[in-house]
Amino acid sequence: MKARALTPLVWVLAAATLGCPGDGSLIPDMMDPMTGTTLASLQNDIFTPICAPCHQPGGIGPMPLDNEANTFASLVDVDSIEIPTIKRVARGNSEDSYLVWKIEARPTILFDPMPLGGPMLSQAEIDSIRDWIDSGAPP
């Protein structure tokens, strides 16, 4: 019985400690579905070091992935060369994005999986790319 009486006090103390203004204005920040994956982080951690050695102007890759602007322009809402009815990156839909098919080496892809010659991306790297796409692939 006393534990129930203390519950509101615990909430008040927690709110005061966390600095909650009491109007709910911080709730969207705390419940943000974004994973924190950004194009900038993907560029820094995956596209530049792993993809850009081939995917750069004049490189063997058909589209440049050497900086954020080129990566975005080359991938987002762009038809795949191999299967033109599929977008390379379909905003909000990693499952139907050809980039994901290529990095997961799905049997539905044409030609080679990426990165060409391996090693394949880690599951964490693939998940980061999927998270970015599923969050709308923001620039």
Image: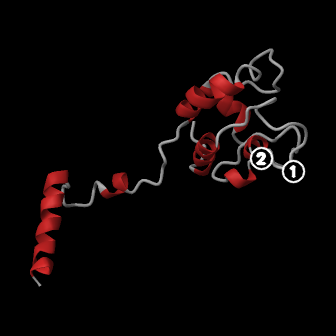
Please identify the residue farthest to the bottom as the structure is shown.
Answer: 1
Contact flag, marks 1 and 2 (Cβ < 8 Å):
yes
The image shows residue 47 at horizontal and vertical percentages of 65, 28
Q: In the rendered view, would you say 20 is above or below 12?
A: above
Q: In the rendered view, would you say 101 is above or below 1?
A: above
Residue closer to the observer: 57 or 23: 57
Q: Which residue is disc 2 drawn over?
A: 101
Residue 87, numbered label: none
Q: In the rendered view, would you say 78 is above or below 117?
A: below
Residue type for callout 1: Thr
Label 2: few (<14), some or many (≥20) within 10 Å? some
- Circle 2: element type: helix
Residue 83's quadrant in the figure? top right
Give the spatial CA distance, label 1 vs label 2.
8 Å
Label 1: few (<14), some or many (≥20) within 10 Å? few
Residue at horizontal 13 percent and vertical 77 percent from the top: 3
Which of marks 2 and 1 precedes in the sequence?
2
Here the colouring is secondary structure
Quarter of the image with the C terminus in it:
top right
- Circle 1: element type: loop
Please identify the residue farthest to the top as the structure is shown.
Answer: 58
Residue 99's quadrant in the figure? top right
The image shows residue 125 at horizontal and vertical percentages of 61, 39
Q: Which residue is disc 1 drawn over?
A: 108
Side of 81 where 136 appears, left or right? left
Residue at horizontal 20 percent and vertical 55 percent from the top: 20
The image shows residue 32 at horizontal and vertical percentages of 42, 53
The image shows residue 135 at horizontal and vertical percentages of 56, 49
Residue 128 seen anywhere in this rendered image of the structure: yes
Residue at horizontal 67 percent and vertical 29 percent from the top: 71
